[in-house]
Amino acid sequence: MASSSLDIEAAQAHKDGGDGGYTTAATAHAVDTDSWQQVGLLLVTGFNCGYVLSFSNLMMVPLGWWWGAACLLLVAGAAWYANWLLAGLHLVDGHRFIRYRDLMGSVFGRKMYYITWFLQFATLLLVSMGFILLGGRALKAISAEFMGDSTPRLQWFIAAAGAVYLVFAYFVPTLSAMRNWLATSAALTVTFDVALLAVLVKDGRSSKHTDYSTHGTQLEKVFSALGAVAATLVCNSSGLLPEIQSTLRKPSVSNMRRALALQYTVGAAAYYGITVAGYWAYGAAASEYLPNQIGGPRWTSVLINAAAFLQSIVSQHMFAAPIHEAMDTRLQRLDEGMFSRHNMARRLVARGVLFSVNVFVTALFPFMGDFVNLFGSFALFPLTFIFPSMMVLKIKGRCDGRWHRLWHWGIIVVASVLGIATSAAAVRLIAHNISVYRFFADV
């Protein structure tokens, strides 16, 4: 698909008056339609999704209080800066780049187009599978509250979650079309955040002896810490900023930076608040899925799991949107509306195949979070840190002075080392879990 997609994008480019007459590649999805407030809310709710229910275990338990807090702040600050930098590259040499791969291909050539395409889509596919797994766990947790030991296997709930996500992705096909669902998503986010925080505070106060120490051999602690760094990056960056920015009205650069400010202040305060509260309440014993550990009445667990699942229906769509856009642009008739009979039929087949594969792989490997960490290490470090600095050096390097070049080379070197180290840690964890779990495990 990459080759055909590239040819179509190049051949069907058109003039767009949204940013001073810049050329924009053809796409089946909406461009230049959304306000920065809408995109900011999309980012806030998108990152405050069901994944936050695992952050205490993934990020704080391996690092402890001081190193954990430092990691949260440093990674968030670095990701904010890197995305701020990338937002400024949306308009280059008379062209508005609505896809990350197009931007890299224009600056560095066709090979970098394919590299970016692979890194981005591999990450987004695995994140989508992670959402399906989280949705399945939430549904199973609700069922367990009423059915006890007779609860069906996790795989049934994974299939149910995937089916619901498919329906939403079919009838709400684009990022801009999500505008009517963002208020609902925000309300659901507040619901499970507030309910979970209340329970965590109650459990934390009732615990007299909480262990906050890190455990394992020195080597295990190092690998676990590297995994925590990768997980922290996953919760702060998506690798799809140009695709999100493409929906913004002019001026697209300053509007994107306003939306990022909302994400890294209001949004980060929410998902970091849950992360810290979960670790404070349970310490090193924090579960990889907090609702399985919380006390209180049955309705509390049902409310948190139900709100998290319903909110994830909207959130997961943001991370899958670039894949949907690529398929829609390749398969649909661009001169017809998204809801023409031909385009709806093509979209049903494309979405159906995508979600069927994702559901099968998720059911086969129900510890998919480990693979998300792997590609968070392998792909998000280049997409978030390395590629933006490379482009700045290529486009502006000779004009901005020696110290500016050293700064960006430093970012490239440090991010490369961290990417390699965290990838090694993720591979080690996957190898361990493959030896422990069997295919289609009911975990």
Image (tube, rainbow, N blue to C red):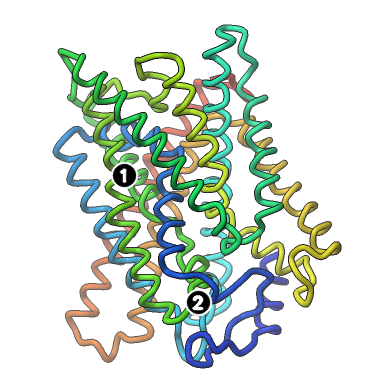
To which quarter of the image does residue 391 belong?
bottom left
Amino acid type indicated by mark 2: Leu
In the rendering, which numbered label is found on residue 11? Answer: none
| Residue 319 screen position, x and y as percent | 53, 53
Q: Secondary structure at mark 2?
A: helix
Residue underneath mark 1: 270
Q: Residues within 10 Å of mark 2 (few under 14, many from 20)?
A: many
- Horizontal side, residue 391 vs residue 319: left or right: left
Q: Is residue 108 above or below residue 331?
A: below
Say whether disc 2 or disc 1 marks the residue closer to the N-terminus. 2
- Residue sitting at 70 percent across and 45 percent down? 167
| Residue 411 screen position, x and y as percent | 27, 66
Q: How many marks?
A: 2
Whether residue 122 appears in this view of the structure is: no
Q: Is residue 442 above or below residue 44?
A: above
| Residue 157 screen position, x and y as percent | 63, 26
Q: Is residue 315 above or below residue 256?
A: above
282 and 36: which is toward the camera: 36
Structural distance between the alpha carbons of marks 2 and 1: 32 Å
Locate the N terminus by quadrant.
bottom right
Amino acid type indicated by mark 1: Ala
Residue underneath mark 2: 103
- Residue sitting at 46 percent across and 36 percent down? 370
198 and 319: which is toward the camera: 198
13 and 184: which is toward the camera: 184
Q: Residues within 10 Å of mark 1 (few under 14, many from 20)?
A: many
| Residue 259 screen position, x and y as percent | 37, 65
Looking at the image, is mark 2 or mark 1 nearer the viewer? 1
- Horizontal side, residue 143 vs residue 294: left or right: right
Q: Is residue 407 above or below residue 147?
A: below
- Residue sitting at 26 percent across and 22 percent down? 282
Q: Secondary structure at mark 1?
A: helix
